Amino acid sequence: MSRRAELVSIYVRIGRTYLRWAPSLLLLAVVVFIPIGLVHAITIDADIGSLDLSGGLKLVAAAAALLALTATGLVGEVFYTGAVAISLTHSREGRPPSLRQIASMVNYGPLIAVDLIYSALVSVGFVFFFAPGVLVYVWLGLAAPVVEIERRGIRASFARSARLVRGKFWVVALVLIPIEIAGDVLTDIATSLTHGLLASELLCEWMADVLFNVAFTPFYAVAAVLLTVDRIGSVDGGVVELHSKPSP
């Protein structure tokens, strides 16, 4: 199969999975992104320019703010992807787990650590050295699904992600990166459009961030899970079953 045909096939599967699982994906996204959206909005709302700092310190503060903004944009997205991996691949009594069951099944320690470490590494790479940021984003981008699908630890999940991506770097990149960029651009547009609609700028930014994360992050999560399942099958010959439909 050519790369183009493979990409088309993956995008079609992402769209079908999103539509089939939309209610449970959106409900899970609401639970995750309401608190995360507030943290992100507070970061955006911080006014570095108002601080009484010298030129050098202001530059450092601006870099730190950009780093924080990039990191908080990813934090939650990775955790959510791990939760979606549970929803799509694990079962309880032969059926997909409910939201309450997912909450009890999440491997919280490793998943949160992977979320924070991955976000920090990608942020540092993008802010100071763009190319390494892209490389880290792709090579380690399947770590969260690995945590929940294979129940691996932090270091093992990152190593496993790199192994799964090897040989399919451009396929993984051309699936995850466009989805990420589209979501970020639409979120920024929505945030700009909502300014002035409410008395609180922070509230506007929070609402826009939550709404667009709820709408678009499921595409990223489904894409990462499908890529992980496919690569597990290709690399090791292992079979990870995806539920054909969500619980009624």
Image: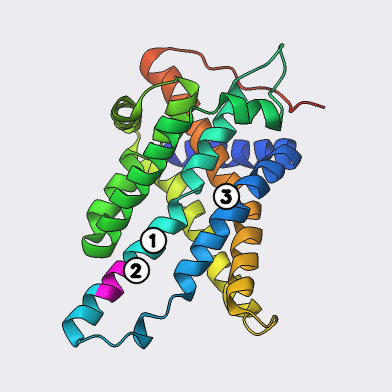
Disc 1: which residue: 70
Q: Is residue 121 left or right of residue 76?
A: left
Neighbour tally class for label 3: few under 14, some 14-19, many 20 plus, Cα within 10 Å: many
Whether residue 62 is situated above or below residue 124 in the rendered picture: below
Q: Is residue 195 left or right of residue 165?
A: right
Q: Amino acid at mark 3?
A: Thr
Disc 2: which residue: 66
In the picture, the quarter occupied by the C terminus is: top right
Q: CA distance from mark 1 to mark 2?
A: 6 Å
The main secondary structure of the magenta stretch is: helix
Disc 3: which residue: 217
Of marks 3 and 1, which one's residue comes earlier in the chain?
1
Write down the region rendered in magenta: 61-66
**SS label for mark 3:** helix
**SS label for mark 2:** helix
- Taking the view exactly as shown, the residue that stands out farthest to the left is 56
Mark identifier at residue 180: none
Q: Amino acid at mark 2?
A: Leu
Q: Residues at badges 1 and 2 in contact (C-beta under 8 Å)?
A: yes
Q: Residues at badges 3 and 1 in contact (C-beta under 8 Å)?
A: no
Task: Identify which residue, 21 or 65, lies in the foreground.
Answer: 65
